[in-house]
Each structure stands twice: as structure tokens, then as C-alpha cells.
Image: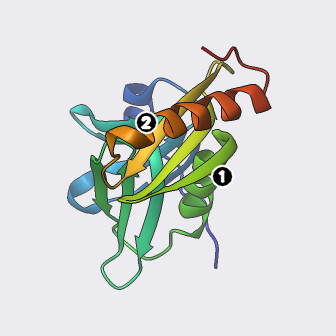
């Protein structure tokens, strides 16, 4: 059964913004999915947060009840839920991450892949973001720069 959990009022006061979905975590903390970020909150206040535009992807490990948000910079936000009743919160996470990505283009390099993303922040502003998985050789840099220009042009952003 898909159930939406309600963030307790004292914890919601620490969050201070609209909560789309929430789930209880171990050790009395809660995960709150907000318009602009994923927030971990406890009685002492916010303990972790990650803006959706900083999240590359997320994964759910049902056996461990672990939700992992992988940052574009290699950082991670990992939480363990108090139960496996997380369908509503994981769906909200999926919507938030994919909703921040407006356009994507890819380039295969000798060392891996580069993704040029056009993201929308909580204020509605568009910006470009490059994510390299693997090394970029110096002679590949012009192609990476062109990839970013093409992605920006595709959505009408200025192209340096």
C-alpha cells in the first residue's frame, strides 16, 4: 500500500518550506522531499540537505531500506528508512531529480563519457552543468566545450 507520511510539526518547522513527501528514518530523523532540495531533519534541525540540481541520480536498495542520492560532484546523501513503505517518497525523489533536468546531451570520450545537462533551479533559472565520468584528454576539451555550447543553444541560453 502506498502511504504518504506526514512530517511531524516540530520537524516541519525546522524545514521551513513546503514538503512534498516525507518518510521516517532510523534514529528519529526524517527525510523530507521539498521543491528545491532533499532534506534530512531531526529534533536538532536540518542535518543534511542536497539541492535537486546537485543530484545526478538516486537509487533505492529495498533489502537494506537505503536510499542513496549521488551528487554531480561525487558526494552522496545516504539514508536508511525506518520501514519499506517508501513508494510515495521515492516517487517524489524521482520526480524532483528528473524535473530539474530540462535537456541532456552526451559525448563519448576515450576515457568515458561527458554529459551536458541543462538544469532548472528552484527559482526557475536555467543553467548548464557538465558531468565527466572518466578522464578527458586535452585534445578532447574542444569537443567537450562544443557539447556544452550545443546544449545551451538547444534551450536558448547564451553560448560563450
Q: Residues within 10 Å of mark 1 (few under 14, many from 20)?
A: few
Kindly tell me whether residue 8 is visible in this rendering: no
Residue at 37% in and 53% down = 70
Q: Viewer-proximal residue, 34 or 121? A: 121
Residue 95 is labelled as: 1
Position above or below: 104 against 156: below
Q: Position of residue 78 (x, y in %)?
A: 29, 57
Q: Viewer-proximal residue, 109 or 3? A: 109
Residue at 60% in and 33% down = 146
Number of the front mark, 2 or 1:
2
Corner quadrant of residue 82 = bottom left
Residue 141 is labelled as: 2
Q: Residues within 10 Å of mark 2 (few under 14, many from 20)?
A: few
**Hey, which residue is sitting farthest front in the picture?**
139
Report helix, strand or loop for mark 1. Answer: helix
Report helix, strand or loop for mark 2. Answer: helix
Q: Position of residue 157 (x, y in %)?
A: 72, 19
Amino acid at each position: 500500500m502506498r502511504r504518504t507520511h506526514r512530517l511531524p510539526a516540530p520537524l516541519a518547522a525546522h524545514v521551513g518550506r513546503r514538503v512534498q513527501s516525507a518518510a521516517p528514518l532510523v534514529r528519529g530523523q526524517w527525510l523530507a522531499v521539498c521543491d528545491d532540495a532533499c532534506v534530512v531533519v531531526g529534533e536538532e534541525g536540518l542535518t543534511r540537505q542536497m539541492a535537486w540540481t546537485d543530484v545526478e541520480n538516486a537509487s533505492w536498495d529495498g533489502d537494506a531500506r537505503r536510499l542513496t542520492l549521488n551528487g554531480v560532484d561525487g558526494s552522496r546523501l545516504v539514508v536508511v528508512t525506518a520501514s519499506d513503505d517508501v513508494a510515495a517518497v521515492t516517487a517524489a525523489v524521482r520526480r524532483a531529480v528528473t524535473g530539474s533536468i530540462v535537456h541532456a546531451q552526451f559525448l563519448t570520450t576515450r576515457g568515458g563519457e561527458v554529459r551536458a545537462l541543462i538544469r532548472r533551479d528552484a527559482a526557475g533559472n536555467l543553467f548548464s552543468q557538465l558531468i565527466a565520468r572518466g578522464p578527458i584528454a586535452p585534445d578532447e576539451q574542444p569537443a567537450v566545450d562544443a557539447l556544452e555550447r550545443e546544449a545551451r543553444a538547444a534551450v536558448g541560453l547564451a553560448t560563450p
